[in-house]
Structure formats: C-alpha cells, structure tokens
C-alpha cells in the first residue's frame, strides 16, 4: 500500500477559508440558509466550516445539521458490507430554506442522490447546493456536480481518497491511497 | 461490522447480548425517523413480507404492518379465520403457497408453541415469531426492554417484576430471557396457581405478595389474565384477583419509591390495573406502543439485510 499527500494541514486550512468565503458570497448572513453535513464523514467538514464562519467571519446564526442517509442508499443487501446507521440531527425546519449539503469526497454521486431523497422527509427546501472538499473527476455514476469544490482530483478506481481531521484522526490532511 | 447472529427471530432464547444492543441502537435511528414529517424510508422496497396470523391480534399486527410500511416493504396479510387452514391445509403447505408468490419474510403468530421454529426448518424465508402459544413473543420483550432503557437509562441492574398470569404468558418468558440477558434482576409475582411449577429453574425470584414485590422493584410489568386460555378456574373470582394482584393508585402511593408501570396490552381496566394508574405519568404503556413500531422496524431491517439479493 502506498500513499501520497494531496493536502497538508496548511493547504487544507487555506481551502476551508476559501470555501467559507464562497459560501458568504452566495448566502450573505445565512438567514435563510442551513448547512447539512452528510454522515458519517461530511460531519467533520461541516462542523469545521461552521466554526470558521462563526469565529473568523462573525456570522452569528449558522444553522448546522447532520443527515444520515443509510436507509436511503441504493446498495442495501447488495454488498458484502453491512450498512451501519448514524444519527440524524436536524433541529430546524428545512421547508423553503436554502440547503448546502456538505461532504468530504464526491465520488460516484450515489450518496448525494440518497441525501436528496432523505432530505425530502423533512420538507420541501427552496434549493439545494453541494459543497465538497475533494471532487474525484471522471468517476460519477450519476449526473451530480458540486457547486463548491475544494480540490479536484483525478484518481483511478483502485485508489482511495482519505480525509483526516484533527478532532478524529489527530491531523488535518488528505491522502491518496493506492492499495 | 455488526449484524445479527441469527437469520430468524424465533425467540429471545436464540439471541445474544450483542444482538439486543444492535437492535436497540438501530431502533434509536428508526425512532427518529418515525418522528419526522415524512415517516418512511425506502430501504426495503424490494422486500415482500407476509403477516400470517393464525391467532387474533390487534396491536401486534398493526404494529408490524406499520413497521413494514414505514420501511417501504410490500405487505400481504393473512388471517386464519378467512383461509384454507379451515379447509384442512397444513402449515407448511399454507406457507409454501404464499412463498411461491415470491415472499421474502414471514411474520407469524400461531397458537402452537414452537410453530416458528418448525417453520424455519421447513421453508425458505426469514421468519419472525409474533407470538407462539404460551411460549415466546420476542418483539414484545424487546420493546419492553427498550422502553425500560428509554425511561431509566439502562436495563442492567434494574429490578423488574412481572405480575399476573405467568402460566399462560408468552410475554413473561420472553421478558425473562431478555431482561436476564441484559443483566436485570427478574421477579415473577402472582397467585400460585398462575405460576409455572418450575419457574425458579429460570433463575427468577418468586413472590406471591404484591406489596412486597412492588417494594422490591424499579419496574412492574402488569400482565393481563388470559381468560381465553383458561380451561379451569385458577382463582376464586376476578374481584378477589383484583384485591390481591391489582395495582391501584393508593397502593403505588404507599410504596417507598416511585416505580414505573408497564403493560403489554390489551388492558383489563379495573382488573390488573386501575384507570388512574394506567393513565398516570408512572405508566409508560403508550410509550411501549410507540417504541414497538421502532423496535419492529429495527428487527425487520436487520433480518432483511441478511437476505441475499
């Protein structure tokens, strides 16, 4: 197994700030916008972006939730892996809101498809955008593209992109792993 | 990765502690789902489930059907009173006929103990026992434990007394297995005639005095007297049973502590439990019903995930 550093902590931090600024450009004071991190891995990115928006850019009313898509996935009973559910925390109304889905890696697009279905159980949002830290090009199974992307990566199917966070893995970094 | 150790839910006897934990953690997620504006998830849209009820049931059948529909499964219902069973068809033939219509899972209630186990050995589908005679009623025991966990934080170390007609109760046996597996202390309380002869072999405490039992416990699970299963008289009169084994507000107020009251339903108000107790904050009877749907969703989801595509 070999691995290559795609982003180190400093580069990751610069990208997070850029993404935060891009969100501000489109959503101003976030009065009608909600951020939703997709479980399990998008949660860390969503938490981090919300924190940057609050402390560095003084945006007070950030509404942040986490959405679990396990029961909406299209590969139930189709893989060797048993799907494990995570918690969903959406303590606000999504009806008529502008939603930003946040996930760490966009690959086939199937998780986002599931999230689009899942969020409908909570109401009818005004619009939904997608923010992703890593966009793996040329690997989509569905016509889904991000509105905000941190870094575009060309990786072959055998390779894996792993995003690490200080709060979970002990360091901020993104690796391309070849197994 | 976690999955159930069994392919059928035939009884709590066949489960281990990890299975129960997994079912409860999954049920937590489904409880959140059924409190959303849209209470349905698409997970089981390619699964068909047959509910076979060879014995009357209202809430268990409704609860299973709702759980199946909330998971987007296709559901067919069957009750013995309207079926070919009356025309002499055997259980295996009945079920195989239904399975040949491409059914993946069977939820069955049957008056004979062991009917689920028997079926699981002879047909090719995942079986959930929804009550087999006076033997087991595993989903009821799971939702009872889940409700205790929700109310008191944990089941481990809690004192739980099951009061009433233990002899004819499948809820009692499943509850004893489930509670013991999770480390609770279990007592049964009722008139001697309604306690099975070898009940102590199960490692439970036995008490015939209700006040002593209630003073000992954190949770009292009140069972209904199953008159329909009694071919002889087990106690002199309903009035005498109520005086000895009925729970009323005055009795609860005279205890040293506040205990939690459960009832699997249907309630005979004024017999094993008075209305002011059943409707009080101490009773979690309606929570049990709500949790029943979430727990059954968890069981069906986890068993369905083991059916090969």
Image (cartoon, helix red, strand yellow):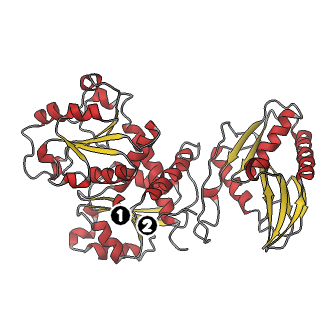
Q: Residue at x 73, y 48 (%)?
A: A43
Near mark 1 (Cα within 10 A), the count class, few <14, some 14-19 or many ≥20, is many
- Residue with the mark numbered 2: B6
Which of the numbered marks, if any, corresponds to residue B10?
1
Height in image: B209 above or below B194? above
Question: Residue B303 location in percent, x, y?
Answer: 47, 64
Q: How many tags in the picture?
A: 2
Can I make out residue A100 in this image? no
* Residue in front for this viewpoint, A175 or B250: A175
Residues at marks 2 and 1 on the same chain: yes
Q: Secondary structure at mark 2?
A: loop
Q: Residue B15, located in which quarter of the rendered image?
A: bottom left
As drawn, is B109 to the left or to the right of B148?
Answer: left
Near mark 2 (Cα within 10 A), the count class, few <14, some 14-19 or many ≥20, is some
Can I make out residue B102 in this image? yes
Height in image: B255 above or below B39? above
The quadrant of the rendering that contains the N terminus of chain A is bottom right
Question: Residue A126 location in percent, x, y?
Answer: 76, 43
Question: Residue A9 location in percent, x, y?
Answer: 88, 51
Q: Check contact, mark 2 vs mark 1: CB within 8 A.
A: yes
Q: Residue B242, located in which quarter of the rendered image?
A: top left
Chain identity of mark 1: B
The quadrant of the rendering that contains the C terminus of chain A is bottom right
Q: CA distance from mark 2 to mark 1?
A: 9 Å
* Residue in front for this viewpoint, A130 or B250: B250
Q: Secondary structure at mark 1?
A: loop
Question: Residue A153 location in percent, x, y?
Answer: 89, 64
């Amino acid at each position: 197994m070999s691995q290559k550093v795609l982003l180190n902590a400093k580069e990751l931090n610069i990208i997070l700030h850029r993404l935060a600024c891009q969100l501000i450009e489109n959503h101003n004071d976030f009065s009608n916008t909600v951020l939703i991190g997709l479980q399990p891995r998008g949660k860390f990115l969503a938490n981090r972006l919300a924190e940057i928006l609050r402390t560095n850019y003084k945006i007070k009313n950030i509404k942040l939730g986490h959405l679990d898509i396990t029961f909406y996935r299209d590969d139930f009973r189709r893989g060797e892996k048993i799907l494990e559910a995570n918690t969903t925390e959406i303590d606000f109304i999504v009806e008529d809101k502008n939603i930003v889905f946040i996930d760490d890696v966009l690959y086939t697009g199937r998780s986002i498809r599931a999230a689009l279905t899942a969020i409908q159980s909570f109401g009818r949002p005004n619009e939904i955008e997608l923010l992703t830290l890593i966009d793996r090009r040329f690997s989509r199974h569905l016509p889904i593209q991000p509105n905000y992307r941190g870094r575009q990566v060309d990786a072959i199917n055998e390779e894996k992109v792993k995003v690490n966070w200080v709060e979970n893995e002990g360091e901020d970094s993104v690796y391309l792993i070849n197994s | 990765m976690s999955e159930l150790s069994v392919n059928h839910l035939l009884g709590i006897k066949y489960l281990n502690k990890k299975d129960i934990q997994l079912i409860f953690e999954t049920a937590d997620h489904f409880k959140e789902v059924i409190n959303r504006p849209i209470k349905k998830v698409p997970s089981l849209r390619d699964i068909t489930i047959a509910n076979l009820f060879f014995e009357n049931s209202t809430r268990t059948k409704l609860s299973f059907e709702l759980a199946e529909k909330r998971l987007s499964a296709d559901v067919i219902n069957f009750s013995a009173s309207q079926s070919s069973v009356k025309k002499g068809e055997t259980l295996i033939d009945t079920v195989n006929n239904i399975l040949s219509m491409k059914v993946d899972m069977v939820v069955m209630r049957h008056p004979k103990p062991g009917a689920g186990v028997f079926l699981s050995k002879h047909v090719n589908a995942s079986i959930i026992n929804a009550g087999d005679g006076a033997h087991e009623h595993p989903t009821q025991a799971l939702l009872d434990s889940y409700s205790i966990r929700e109310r008191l934080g944990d089941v481990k170390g809690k004192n739980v007394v099951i009061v009433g007609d233990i002899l004819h109760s499948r809820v009692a046996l499943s509850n004893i297995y489930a509670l013991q597996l999770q480390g609770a202390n279990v007592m049964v309380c009722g008139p001697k005639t309604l306690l099975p002869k070898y009940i102590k072999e199960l490692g439970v405490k036995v008490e015939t005095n209700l006040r002593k039992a209630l003073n000992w416990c954190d949770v009292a699970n009140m069972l209904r007297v199953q008159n329909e299963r009694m071919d002889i008289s087990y106690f002199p009169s309903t009035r005498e049973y109520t005086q000895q084994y009925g729970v009323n507000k005055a009795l609860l107020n005279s205890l040293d502590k506040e205990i939690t009251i459960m009832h699997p339903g249907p309630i005979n108000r004024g017999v094993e439990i008075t209305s002011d107790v059943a409707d009080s904050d101490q009773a979690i009877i309606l929570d049990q019903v709500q949790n029943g749907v979430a727990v059954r969703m968890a069981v069906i989801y986890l068993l369905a995930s083991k059916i090969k595509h």
